[in-house]
Every structure is written in structure tokens, then in C-alpha cells.
Amino acid sequence: MSRRFHRVQPPAVASVAGGGDQVSGLDHWMLRIPSFFRKMALFCLPALLLSCSRAAAPEVKVDKANAMRLLEAFLKIDRRESGQPGAKRAAEFIQRTAQGYGLDARIDSFQEDTADGPKTFHNVCFEVKGKSSRFVVVGSHFDAKKFAGFKFEGANDSGSSTATLLEVARALAKSGVVPPYTVKFVCFDGEECVYDYTGNDGLHGSKRAAAAMDLKDCAAMLLLDMMGDRGLNLTVPRDSDPRLAAALFAIAKQSGLEAAWFSSNMLDDHIPFQEKGVPSLDLIDFAYGPNNAYWHSSEDTLDKLSADSLGLVGDATLRLLLTMPDILGR
Ligand SMILES: [Zn+2]
């Protein structure tokens, strides 16, 4: 990935979690309750309702050891830079892996002019059918940024999220649990820019997918990016949907996942969906090493990552998917 951009005002976290309307509907009978207890009930009810609905959702967990095995295998593919043979091999690895999990995975190849000349990109798409035709997009880019001066492994950026997305898909497909909304997994090529993110430089795969999909039935977009750091602390961009962010924070509190608001928005693959009105959440840790020093450096290597981090984010993603109607209040 990616980079941060302009600062915005923090969203009112306390007002999210879907409780506002429910509380106002209770005002009438609650007037008969003494003031102290009324205030306590108003404070606790949204969390209680959310936790009750979550408790009703089935549990599906990822196998973090499998996520790590996938990551190790994926990183054996050399030079995943967009337009290079390695990126095509990476797309084929993702397709083959998803097909091995019984999913109908297809590669969408397309050519675009870029700041670096014409390139062929390869998005990989597969889905798990839900109870509804409404759907959630779960995305991750899989290309690695091109650097001239050193060998860039891209273990965290973008190996970690690619492996975790595949393991989330496997766990969901094999569980037999039908998610409330269909889950469309998309592995994006061409996230990384060559020079900067202006014009047609970067976010190629996500722009292509967002343009190709009919998004009127798209309930939400969850993006995984750089989330395998051993010292994981998700830095949730300010432009994330407040309901999705509040749900993530609630899940994180229960699971021990570290997550907090970031200081700014983030330019990443969720943006093309967000610009089309899709509520989105970027699950990213943009504090990778001291002062984010491992990001886009020769230090982005497998030894900096942990299976626990892949597992925590994978499980949080599954939880979000299985409780999505409650989170969005519909
Ligand atoms: Zn990057």
C-alpha cells in the first residue's frame, strides 16, 4: 500500500454502534424510570443489543497456521510487481488456492496505460454465497511495489493480507455456515503506484473492480492491507465507516486485537468503492516498525510478521461478515 492523506475531524465514536434510533424509541416508557437508572440503561443498551445479536451469530474461525503456510508459499513468488511475470504467477497462485478450497475463482486480466507505459493487470475474484444477494466485498492487493535499489519482499505489503484473505475464504467456505450477505473476495493487482497516486498511477485493480460491479446491492467493503506485523496495532483510517469501525473496536476489545483510530484518512483500495457510496473499512497497520520504517523498505520481511496477527485480523473479518446486517442496522 498506500499512503495517508489529509487530516479530518475524528468521528463521534460514542454515537455509533447502531444504538441511537433504538434508544430514542424507548424514551416514552423510560421516563417512568428514575433518572440514574434511565441514564445507565441508555448508556448500556446499544452495547447490550449489539452483543446479543453478535452472540446469536455462528462462530467461524480461521486457521492461523494455514494462513502462515499460505504466506510462506506466496512469498516464494519472486517479483510481484504489476506487469511482471511474477504478478501473473501470484494471481495464478491465488486462483489455484481458492479453487483448491472449492471456490470458483476467475482471473480478470486487463490492460491499461500507466505512468510506466502499458501494463497488463490481473484481478482474482471468487465468492461465498450468502442468504441474500446483497454482498460485501473483501479485498486485498497482491502486487508488490517496484524498487530499483533493493530487493523488496513485501511480506507484509501485500503478502500478509493476501494470505489472510485466502484463509478467511477457506474457513468460511468449509464451515458450512451461510453468511447473511454474499461475500465477494477480490485480490487486486496494481495497487502500488510507480511515482504517485495522481492520474492513472496506482489503485488499478480496485478501480477496475469498483467500475465493473453493480454496487447497488453492495452493503460494505472490507479491505485488508499490511496487517501481519508482530506488533500489530490496526490504525483505522478516519474515512472508515463509523459503524464498521465501532464494530471492529468492539470485536478487538473481546479478542485482544489492538486497534485505534489513525490520525488521517488513507489512500488505499477502499477509495474507489467509497467514492461510489459503499461503506468501507480499511484494516491496516500503518505503524510497521519504528516510525513505520519497515514500510516500503528491505525490512518488510517474513520475520517481522506473526501467525497470531494473521489469525486475529482473519477472525475479526469473519466476525464482521457474519454480523454485518446488525452492524449496518438493516
Ligand atoms: Zn505498499
Image (spheres, rainbow, N blue to C red):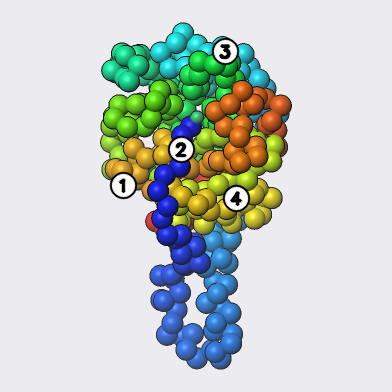
**Residue 291 image-quadrant placement:** top right
What is the CA distance from the residue labelled 4 to the residue labelled 1?
24 Å
What is the CA distance from the residue labelled 3 to the residue labelled 2?
25 Å
Q: Residue at x 31, y 19 (%)?
A: 114
Q: Secondary structure at mark 3?
A: loop
Q: Secondary structure at mark 4?
A: strand
Q: Earlier in the sequence, mark 3 or mark 4?
A: 3
**Residue 175 image-quadrant placement:** top right
Q: Residues within 10 Å of mark 3 (few under 14, many from 20)?
A: some
> Mark 3 and 2 residues: CB-CB less than 8 Å, in contact?
no
Disc 3 marks a residue whose amino acid type is Ile
Disc 2 marks a residue whose amino acid type is Arg
Residue that protrudes farthest toward the front in the picture? 149
> Mark 4 and 1 residues: CB-CB less than 8 Å, in contact?
no
Residue that protrudes farthest toward the top in the picture? 85
Q: Residues within 10 Å of mark 4 (few under 14, many from 20)?
A: many
Question: On the image, numbered disc 3 is attached to which residue?
Answer: 77
What is the CA distance from the residue labelled 2 to the residue labelled 4?
18 Å
Mark 4 residue's CB less than 8 Å from ligand 1: no
Question: On the image, numbered disc 4 is attached to which residue?
Answer: 259
Q: Secondary structure at mark 2?
A: strand
Q: Nearer the viewer, mark 3 or mark 2?
A: 2
Q: Residue at x 53, y 53 (%)?
A: 261
Disc 1 marks a residue whose amino acid type is Gly
Checking the image for residue 3, the label placed there is: 2
304 lies above or below 58: above
Give coordinates of residue 315: x percent, y percent: 61, 41
